[in-house]
Image: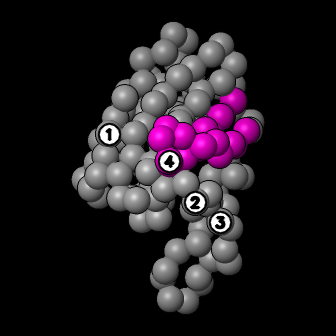
Amino acid sequence: MVRGGSTESIHRAREAARGFACGLVPAPDSDVVDTLVLVVSELATNALRHGGGRYALELSATRDALTAAISDPSPVPPRERAPDLNGGSGGFGWHMVRRLTTDLTVAPGPGAGKTIRARLSRLGT
């Protein structure tokens, strides 16, 4: 489990995701690993920005899938918004995560917060 509460922790979350995936036997293809790292980075960033300023990351794998679960203290689910193409205020991450994952759920807990589970095919697309 990786816990984060600062922008520096996003780097640790990415490295944890890469190390986790590359340590699996058999290891997923590099494009699947890169996709997992990107999804973890986006979810951790969103948790810091919109989810209460801290998060916990748990990674798991089955023979067919990789899952990243990010929990934060906010009960408010992510909302889709139009990406800001001119002002640089974001809006791209949730769209990207939805497109890159095979299954994406938002569930209550732990406590008053929420957990977002992002599942990727271990075999790629």
Element assignment for label 1: strand
* Residue 120, magenta (yes or no): yes
Numbered mark located on residue 112 in the image: 4
Q: Which residue is drawn at 40% across and 59% down?
A: 52
- Where are the magenta residues, as a range? 103-121
Say whether marks 3 and 2 touch (CB < 8 Å): yes
Dot placed on the residue nearer the N-terminal end, 1 or 3? 1
Element marked by disc 2: loop
Q: Indicate yes or no whether the magenta region holds residue 94.
A: no
Kind of residue at badge 1 = Arg
Using the numbered discs, state the Cα–Cα distance from disc 3 to disc 2 in whole angstroms: 9 Å
The amino acid type, in three-letter code, at marker 3 is: Arg
**How far across and how far down the image is residue 108, in percent?**
60, 43
Percent across and percent down for residue 16 are: 36, 33
Residue 53 position by quadrant: bottom left
Are discs 1 and 3 less than 8 Å apart at CB? no
Residue at the disc numbered 2: 76
The residue that mark 1 highlights is 3
Cα distance in 3D space between marks 3 and 4: 18 Å
Contact flag, marks 4 and 1 (Cβ < 8 Å): no
Q: Are marks 3 and 4 in contact (CB under 8 Å)?
A: no
* Residue highlighted by disc 3: 79
Quadrant that contains the N terminus: top left
Task: Give the spatial CA distance, label 2 vs label 4.
Answer: 10 Å
Amino acid identity at mark 2? Val
